Image (tube, grey):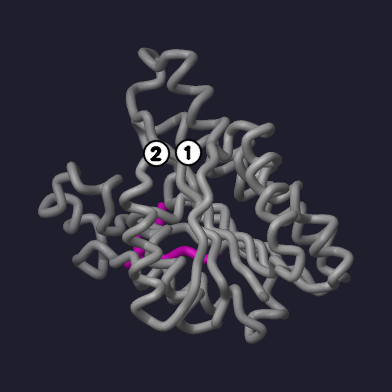
Amino acid sequence: MKCALVTGGSRGIGRAICIKLAQELGYHVLINFQHNEDAAKETLVGIEATGGTGTILKFDVADHAAVTNALSQWEASHPEAVIEVIVNNAGIAKDGLFMWMSSEDWSSVINTTVNGFYHVTQFFIQKLLRQRYGRIINIISVSGVKGTPGQTNYSAAKAALLGATKALAQEVAKRNITVNAVAPGFIHSDMTANMDEKELKKLIPANRFGEPEEVANLVSFLASSKAGYITGEVININGGVYS
């Protein structure tokens, strides 16, 4: 059983990626979530509606012990499973001007994005190296590429993941493992629900917000065998928003 793991897979971009990986590439998808089990179940329903299969896995990517325990237990009960694709999508935003930013707001955003990438990817990396195949895709953001005022913590976390993507890609390329980052701009999701879309559209050459499915299309391509010679790349999907 060939599998793909998507962290933060219960809603928005994560959900769209889960469904696309099952639908287009035939993966059994591990849907990670932390809080909203009902939403994770809805993702599973979406996968099954396309004829695919999936499993819901609850753990906090920022908690090393929780990640290790959940994934170890799942592996033990599915010895036939082979993880080929890891999509590090889990992330949180706690926006505010840096001068008023609390230590907790800084640390929690960094821990979820950067340490979450480490905990999940580190768990699988030796297995990917042994099987000589893998696709690691890190969901960053336009904020990590150009920086966004009011999001110094989020921009720092996503920029760190950009650097990790480029470094790890070079370490594992000889074993047919690719590591790439996808940097969405303004995409319709919970994170952008409270934004002034009418005003922000003026900043976007394409004159619209993107859809989660459009990001999922790109991730599905990078997760496929077609993208074997693309690694260490940051691919922007933002309707033309550049610094």
Give how far across and how far down residue 175 sits, in percent: 86, 70
Q: Is residue 230 left or right of residue 148?
A: right
Q: Is residue 138 left or right of residue 22?
A: right
Amino acid on which the number 1 mark rests in the picture: Ser
Does 242 lie within the magenta span?
yes
What numbered label is drawn on residue 35? 2
Q: Residue at x 27, y 48 (%)?
A: 190
Q: Callout 1: few (<14), some (14-19), or many (20+) C-alpha neighbours within 10 Å?
A: many
Number of callouts in the render? 2
Name the residue carrying label 1: 155
Q: Callout 2: few (<14), some (14-19), or many (20+) C-alpha neighbours within 10 Å?
A: few
Give how far across and how far down residue 72 sits, in percent: 72, 48
- Between the C-alphas of marks 1 and 2, the distance is 24 Å
Judged from the image, the secondary structure of the residue bearing numbered disc 1 is helix
Location of residue 187 (image quadrant): bottom left
Q: Nearer the viewer, residue 175 or 72?
A: 72
Magenta: main secondary structure = loop
Q: Residue at x 70, y 41 (%)?
A: 68
Q: Nearer the viewer, residue 232 or 105?
A: 105
Which circle, 1 or 2, is nearer the viewer?
2
Q: Which residue range is magenta in the image? A: 235-243
Amino acid on which the number 2 mark rests in the picture: His
Q: Is residue 199 left or right of residue 48?
A: left
